[in-house]
Structures are given as structure tokens and as C-alpha cells.
């Protein structure tokens, strides 16, 4: 799933502070079933799977498809209020993701609907609803989960809940695969600049050092990212 995140550029200290002000700031007790109980349980699960779960997955995927297409297009061309309203609430033949999430909870499409809704609310600066929906999203796929955590960090930072914001930026870093430079850079740079802007110097230095050690100059050059990490570190007293 694409995500529309702003490319990070080199910033001076005062610019980082200004940007920070607008940041888009499991486990078991055994239960034994015997005789016919096992058969009934298995039969019940098979009935649920074939008569409810599989049809619901298919129906929900069909319903979310137009909204998902429009959302993906916005991540490439830019978000605007009219398109966001269509994605969230539906219209013109589109079923809104809020309806999909409400009607098909527990399905893959319902889960994606929460991610899309959260991103849309974030762009609309409705940070409480962004948090509400993004916290309902969960996936084992590292890239979108890291993106969801970053957006939660952004929303909490806008709500001036800095402890929560930093917690989710850290989660975004922890989830980001070191082999995925794009996701890794987005997560590390977000955490580094947030710590820098909020006076958490030690944490900021640690994250800047990780960027220096993990992100190749080739990646930055090929993606036209002017992130002068040595300058950030030098300003914080770390000279190469």
C-alpha cells in the first residue's frame, strides 16, 4: 500500500523546531474438549469459515476496492478534501471505508479500511479520529505497520502528547526492516527529528547515528534526499 509521506530535507535547528510544532506529530490456559464436543466445535468452525468468513472477505474486498483505488491515487497525486470525503464516507458509486470498517470488522478489507481512514483523517488534521482508526489497524507486514506507527506518532505529536508520539516513533523504528532502506529511513529520520526538536538530545544522537550507519549515500542520492546527518550530529556536539 502506498503512503504519502513528505521527503525529509536538511533543516537547521530553528526549522526543526518549527516543523515539530506541525508534526504529524499476546498470551494461555489449556482447555480440553472430548468426544462429540470436538466434532461440534470443528463443525461449527467449518460452517463459520465457509458460510460467513469467506463470503465476508470476498464481499468486503469488493466493496472497498473503489475507495482503495482512489486512496492509492491520492498518495501519488496529492490529498484533497473532496477525494478524502469520498474515501471516508462514499458517494458516486464508492463505498466509504468507514462503512467497510463498520460492517466487516475482522476481515482483511476491514483492517485496511482503518489504515486508510486513519491516513485520511491525518491529512484532514482530525488527529483524534486518526488515532482511533490507526490503533485499530494491525498487520504482520512490516512496511504498512511501520507506516501506521509513524502516522500515530504524527497524530500524537499534533495533539501535544509527546510521550505517546515518541513511543510510536520508536515502534515504527523497531518494526522497520533494516533491509528496507526506504521504510527504515522514514522511521529513523522521524524519530531523530522529533527527539531533536523536543530536547531529547541523547535519543536524537542515537537515531542520527543509526541513519549514518544504516542508510547508504546511494539511497539518499537516488531518492533526491538531502539529509546531511553529519551536520545534525555536529550541532549536537558529535564531530565525525
Image (cartoon, rainbow, N blue to C red):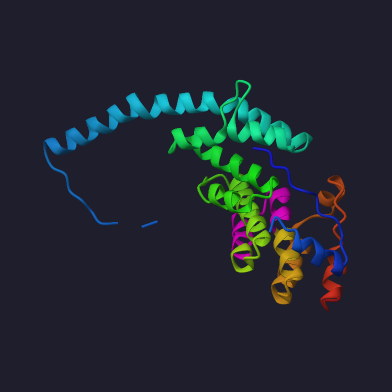
Residue 85: x, y in percent?
A: 65, 35
Does residue 109 appear anywhere in the picture? Answer: no
Residue 152: x, y in percent?
A: 61, 55
Residue 216: x, y in percent?
A: 80, 55
Does residue 148 appear anywhere in the picture? Answer: yes
Q: Nearer the viewer, residue 180 or 21?
A: 21
Q: Nearer the viewer, residue 188 or 21?
A: 21
| Residue 83 picture quarter | top right
In the rendered image, the vertical position of residue 157 relative to residue 42, given as above or below: below
Q: Is residue 56 left or right of residue 37?
A: right
Q: Residue at x 53, y 51 (%)?
A: 135
Q: Is residue 186 magenta?
A: yes
- The span picked out in magenta is 166-187
Dominant SS in magenta:
helix
Q: Residue at x 12, y 35 (%)?
A: 36
Q: Is residue 15 left or right of residue 27?
A: right
In the rendered image, the vertical position of residue 233 relative to residue 29, given as above or below: below
Residue at the limit of the structure toward the top, as seen here: 93
Q: Is residue 239 magenta?
A: no
Q: Give the position of the C terminus as an image quadrant.
A: bottom right
Residue at the limit of the structure toward the bottom, as seen here: 237
Q: Nearer the viewer, residue 216 or 237?
A: 237
Q: Give the position of the N terminus as an image quadrant.
A: top right
Residue 41: x, y in percent?
A: 21, 36
Q: Nearer the viewer, residue 96 or 163?
A: 96
Q: Residue at x 60, y 49 (%)?
A: 130
Amino acid at each position: 500500500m502506498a503512503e504519502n509521506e513528505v521527503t525529509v530535507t536538511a533543516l537547521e535547528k530553528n526549522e526543526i523546531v518549527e516543523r515539530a510544532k506541525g508534526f504529524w506529530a499476546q498470551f494461555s490456559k489449556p482447555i480440553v474438549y472430548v468426544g462429540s464436543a470436538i466434532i461440534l466445535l470443528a463443525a461449527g468452525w467449518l460452517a463459520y469459515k465457509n458460510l460467513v468468513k469467506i463470503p465476508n472477505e470476498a464481499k468486503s474486498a469488493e466493496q472497498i476496492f473503489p475507495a482503495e483505488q482512489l486512496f492509492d491515487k491520492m498518495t501519488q497525486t496529492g490529498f484533497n478534501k473532496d477525494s478524502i470525503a469520498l474515501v471516508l464516507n462514499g458517494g458516486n458509486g464508492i463505498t466509504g471505508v468507514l462503512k467497510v470498517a463498520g460492517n466487516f470488522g475482522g476481515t482483511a478489507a476491514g483492517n485496511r479500511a482503518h489504515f486508510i481512514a486513519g491516513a485520511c483523517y491525518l491529512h484532514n488534521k482530525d488527529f483524534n479520529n486518526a488515532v482511533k482508526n490507526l490503533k485499530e489497524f494491525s498487520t504482520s507486514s512490516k512496511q504498512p505497520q511501520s507506516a501506521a506507527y509513524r502516522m500515530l506518532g504524527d497524530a500524537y505529536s499534533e495533539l501535544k502528547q509527546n510521550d505517546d508520539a515518541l513511543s510510536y516513533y520508536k515502534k515504527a523504528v523497531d518494526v522497520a526492516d533494516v533491509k528496507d532502506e526506504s521504510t527504515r529511513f522514514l522511521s529513523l529520520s522521524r524519530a531523530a527529528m522529533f527527539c531533536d526538536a523536543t530536547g531529547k538530545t541523547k535519543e536524537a544522537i542515537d537515531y542520527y547515528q543509526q541513519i549514518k550507519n544504516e542508510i547508504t549515500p546511494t539511497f539518499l542520492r537516488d531518492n533526491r534526499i538531502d539529509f546531511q546527518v553529519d551536520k545534525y550530529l555536529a550541532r549536537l556536539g558529535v564531530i565525525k
